[in-house]
Image (cartoon, grey):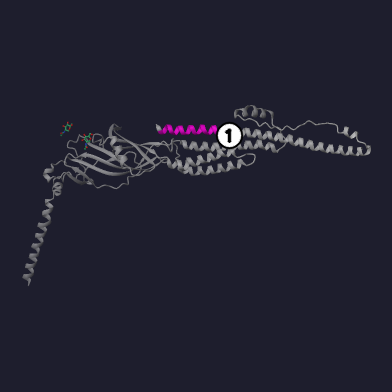
Amino acid sequence: MVQVKFILSCWYLIFKVWVTLCTPDQDFSKNEYVRFFETFKDVIGNKFLRPVKNWTTPVQLNITLALYEIIGVDEKAHILQTYIWLRQFWVIEFLVWDPADFDGLNKVSIPVDNIWHPDLYVYEFIEEDLSPQIPYMYVISSGRITHDKPLRIVSSCNLNIFYFPFDIQTCTLSLGPFLHTASDIVLGLHQTSEEITSESKENIQNKGEWELLNIDAKTTIWQMQGEDWSKVIFKLRMKRRPLLYLVNLVIPSAFLMVIDLISFYLPVHQIDRGAFKMTLLLGYTVVLLIMNDLLPNNAGGTPIIGIYFSVCLALMVISLLETIFISNILHQTRSNSHKVPTFLKRITFSFIAKLICFSPPESHHEPAFKNPQSDPSEELVSSPAAQSSQLIQNLLTSLSRDILVIRSHLDYRSLHEHKQEEWIRIAFIWDCFLFRLYLLLLVVFFVILISCWCMWYNA
Ligand SMILES: *[C@@H]1O[C@H](CO)[C@@H](O)[C@H](O)[C@H]1NC(C)=O
Ligand SMILES: *[C@@H]1O[C@H](CO)[C@@H](O)[C@H](O)[C@H]1NC(C)=O
């Protein structure tokens, strides 16, 4: 029994050894990758070794980037957020092989962390890079490494918001090794600026607020403390799509301005135009409150659009003041004391009326102060009965006195009405004049503003 058990376990052992020795190991040792990594195990796995045979030669590192998205621009903090793909190429001089030796194996992916790689760094970084780490990179038989990685870059950028929202911004991304000087790593460009631009334009999916104009790339040498650092500067030029701001800010305030303009046609002596304008001004303040959130305001200066809003507000205040002035003139008609001062009359009728081509209406209906003192007594004398004539005369006298009183009252009324009419006419002329002045001011302002924006946009 014991013998049988022993023989069985012996067979089992032999079988086990045969299985473990023969099947998997044979396949594994045949694998070209295994042979490859066996051959280059001194190079792959030595991450301290700068990959040049002669230590005096620098590593030639060629880079390029493709912009995938402009995530956002923070005007207040002067921050640009972009998402890019960075491609790096360099040669490991120790990792050169003949593909024929490895059954045609020409391209191998190797772990990034196991091998020397340049400490490339974005100079404008102001926040840690949170993009995912890509653990592998490719090496081809000539020893050339291709290392692609995505980068979410939060970088500082000096923004000029003067022409907001019609602005074009230029932001730079400077890439270079953080530690290695130009004697260790020399940077080069893998693609020309045009290629980078066209590739980036194809890649950008998001039709957001910013439109990429072009990317300009160049290599430079940066000097500090007697040492040289090689670096590549990418200049991103981008243009804002202004529609959002036009719809939310410029157009509502333009509408309010138009209403303000048209409110000049409200008859000021019948309707309280001042109250209407005051309401408009309140409405405008609400627009300004909304605008405060959307408008970039920083120490770099006020954008033209801010000036636009201030001027719009100022114009509204001016138009309110004008209405107050006209209302004051019209008030003179109610307080029935003053006559129109001569200088005002002269200025108004001989100067302003001509300026605005105002022709006064002809019907002056001057009251006829003729005082027709035609003797009523003549007819009375010829009356037959003296007493009755005396009576009639008395009656007539008192009647005529009454009529005189009424007449004088009417005369007074008509004089007053004339005065009133004159005031109204003066108010009307001034209103007309100031309205045109206001219109002129408005047109000049808008022409300046629009030409300013257009000039920048075409530049
Ligand atoms: C390394 O390169 C320098 C200059 O290129 C040369 O003078 C030097 O002899 C080289 N050293 C070796 C060991 O080849
Ligand atoms: C880098 O660019 C230079 C010049 O453009 C070129 O001679 C070199 O072969 C490139 N190196 C790599 C690794 O692509």
Q: In this orientation, does residue 175 appear? A: no
Q: Is residue 71 left or right of residue 282?
A: left
- Seen in the picture, residue 26 relative to 359 is either above or below; the reply is below
Q: Is residue 109 left or right of residue 81?
A: left
Residue 326 image offset from top left, x and y in percent: 63, 36
Q: Residue at x 55, y 43 (%)?
A: 282
- Which residue matches tag 1? 435
Q: Residues within 10 Å of mark 1 (few under 14, many from 20)?
A: some
- Amino acid at the residue labelled 1: Phe
Q: Residue 80 at x, y = what percent?
A: 37, 41
- Frontmost residue, 336 versus 95: 336
- Number of numbered tags placed on the structure image: 1
Q: Is residue 311 above or below residue 346?
A: below
Prevailing secondary structure of the magenta residues: helix
Q: Secondary structure at mark 1?
A: helix
Q: Is residue 439 magenta?
A: yes
- Magenta part of the chain: 437-457
